[in-house]
Structures are given as structure tokens and as C-alpha cells.
Amino acid sequence: MTEAIYPLLRDGGPLLAAFNGVQALLKAAFSEKQFKYHMVQPRMSAQRWADIARVAPAIGVSLASWNKTAVSGSAFYADVTVPVFLISSQNSPNDLLLGTKQSPGIAGMMAVAVFALDGRRIEGVGTISVKAASNLEAANWVNDRTAISTLQVVVKNVGFNADAIRAQLLELENSDGTWDFAPSVTQTDGANEA
């Protein structure tokens, strides 16, 4: 696999490749000229969701888990869950499902996203399965003129070539542009959420 398809391990390796592959398929279906894209952090507050939802329609993509489902031999292969969040906002709550001529509704966004992702193969990474699409989970995150649909997107059987990874691990301490940081204190009050 090439570095363009298969990012360096320190940058996320196959996890980043799965994330980027899902996002690229979404961008082909939902143009960046019309849809705002967000990287969704784990455990976002309701206020952060409200901030993101201020500009809609929008698409959020996150990374949730990498779960091994079967014995994979000498290399680790597992299913990567890449949650996708579809955000629609309307002047009237009655338009949230079907949308208007000015802005898509959540039903159409869900249908397009499932069609764009399910069964697609990310070359060198794995095959996508959309396990669920729901607009119920986010009901308390935003006001009643905004809808957020969550898609449980799984990229199946994602792994790495053990020999290629071992070579990258050796380079983490020896080559330019690798990890170079000191531990930092994490803010817990949410003061600088962005």
C-alpha cells in the first residue's frame, strides 16, 4: 500500500485511511460548496453541537472504535466504526424531514448518505457497511429547528501489514517529522472548545 492510501502509523495508519475514505465518499455525494464539514470529537457537549449546527446543512465525521471480530492471523484486522452525522436546519420544524427548495431535509440526506456509502470499497482499506441510520439520538442536542441524523458506518476488516508497520515504528524516533512533543495538561472546563 502506498503512503497516500495508507497513512503513517503515527498519523492513524489504517484508522485514518478508513476515516478519510468514508469522508471522501461523502464529499463526492455532498459537495463542500453546499455542505459544511466537521471533524466530530468524542463526547461533545450539547453546546458544541449547537455551535456546529449553526451552519447547515453540514456533515460531521468521527472515529469511534476498532473492534476485532474474528481471529486475524499474524496481523490485526478488525471493523472500524466511523460515525457520520448529517445536520439539517429549517425555519420551520415541519420542514426538517423533507426539506425545502432552499435546504435539504434529513430524510433525503440519510438516503443519499446510505446510498453513497453502503457496500462501497475503500481501496486497500476495507468495505463499508452502514449498520444503522437514525435521527433519534440527537433529539436533545439541538433546538427544534435542527435535525441531526447519526449513521453507524463500519469499514469491515481493516488492518495493516505487520512488516510495514514495524519499519514505521523504527522511524518514529529516527526520522524528521515524527512525534516531537512533551506531555501537556488537558483543560477540563471546556473553556477553549473550538
Image (cartoon, rainbow, N blue to C red):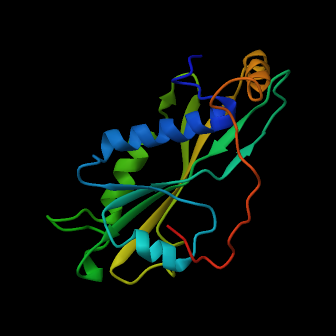
The correct choice, above or below, for 124 with respect to 183 in the image is above
Determine the residue positioned at 69% across, 49% down. Answer: 65
Q: Nearer the viewer, residue 159 or 47?
A: 47
Q: Nearer the viewer, residue 156 or 43?
A: 43
- Residue 5, given in percent of the width and then of the height, sits at 53, 24
- Residue 93, given in percent of the width and then of the height, sits at 30, 81
- Residue 129, given in percent of the width and then of the height, sits at 55, 41
- Residue 86, given in percent of the width and then of the height, sits at 41, 60
Q: Nearer the viewer, residue 159 or 99?
A: 159
Q: With 126 as the anchor, is 58 left or right in this view?
A: left
User: Based on the displayed image, in which of its 4 quarters is residue 180 positioned?
Assistant: top right
Q: Quadrant of the N terminus?
A: top right
Q: With 73 as the anchor, is 46 left or right in this view?
A: left
Q: Nearer the viewer, residue 44 or 134?
A: 44
Q: Is residue 121 visible?
A: yes
Determine the residue positioned at 84% across, 30% down. Answer: 71
Determine the residue positioned at 80% across, 24% down. Answer: 75
The correct choice, above or below, for 74 with respect to 97 in the image is above
Q: How many marks?
A: 0
